[in-house]
Image: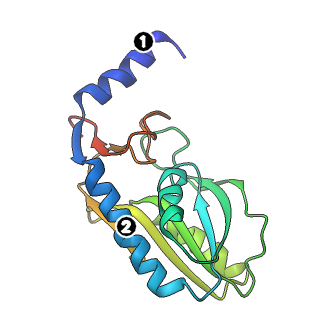
Amino acid sequence: MGESRLEEVRQVRTEADCLCPAEAVSAAIAQMAEAITDDLADRNPLVLCVMTGAVVPTAWLLELLAFPLELDYLHATRYDGAIQGAELRWIHQPRMALADRTVLLVDDILDEGVTLDALQSWCRAQGAAEVRTAVLARKLHDRNHLGTSADYIGLDVPDRYVFGAGMDYKGYWRNLPAIYAVRGT
């Protein structure tokens, strides 16, 4: 990566607006974990982390889920480093069988609902008995034409380009504990 691009990434972080401080993100994860525990603790769920964005919120959630579960991941993306979504592209499908399982899909953000809807449909086609969804953030806008929702939602964020807490800006800043928005978006 060239120094000019790295400088741009640093500048975006410096100028970004903090939408959800780390404490708010942690509290949202704790509330989600409590609701997930209430609903799924006795169902032997298979937790599927939607890579790459959900790796951070999934790890935070797993620390708080004190019941037996199995973990796998899948990687299907519409963004692939871009700032706007395109067609869904599969990179990795889970190795564990979904048939007759309660599946919990964990994703970083619910934006237009296209990715989450496609992943839920795929899980059902694999024979999952039940598919639940958890997202750290839900973007507030009227472009969710599929009407896709999530069962567990951590935080609502405005319709801006957000990063941090697993979400990236051009592949960077997933590691931040808070959620930021690119200035001017």
Calculate the distance from the C-alpha at mark 1 to the C-alpha at mark 2: 39 Å
Q: Looking at this view, is 40 or 14 the one in front? A: 40
Furthest residue to the top?
A: 3
Tag 2: residue type? Answer: Ala
Quadrant location of residue 50? bottom right
Identify residue for label 1.
4
**Which quadrant of the figure contains the N terminus?**
top right
- SS under mark 2: helix
Answer with left or right where residue 8 lies relative to residue 15.
Answer: right
Furthest residue to the front?
A: 66
Tag 1: residue type? Answer: Ser
User: Of the residues tagged 1 and 2, which is closer to the observer?
Assistant: 2
Residue occupying the point 37% across, 43% down: 163
Instruction: Give how far across and how far down residue 132 sits, in percent.
Output: 52, 79
Q: Looking at this view, is 65 or 109 the one in front? A: 65
Instruction: Give how far across and how far down residue 174 sits, in percent.
Output: 45, 41
**Which quadrant of the figure contains the C terminus?**
top left
Residue occupying the point 26% across, 26% down: 14
Residue 145 visible to an observer of this rendering: no
Identify residue for label 2.
30
- SS under mark 1: helix
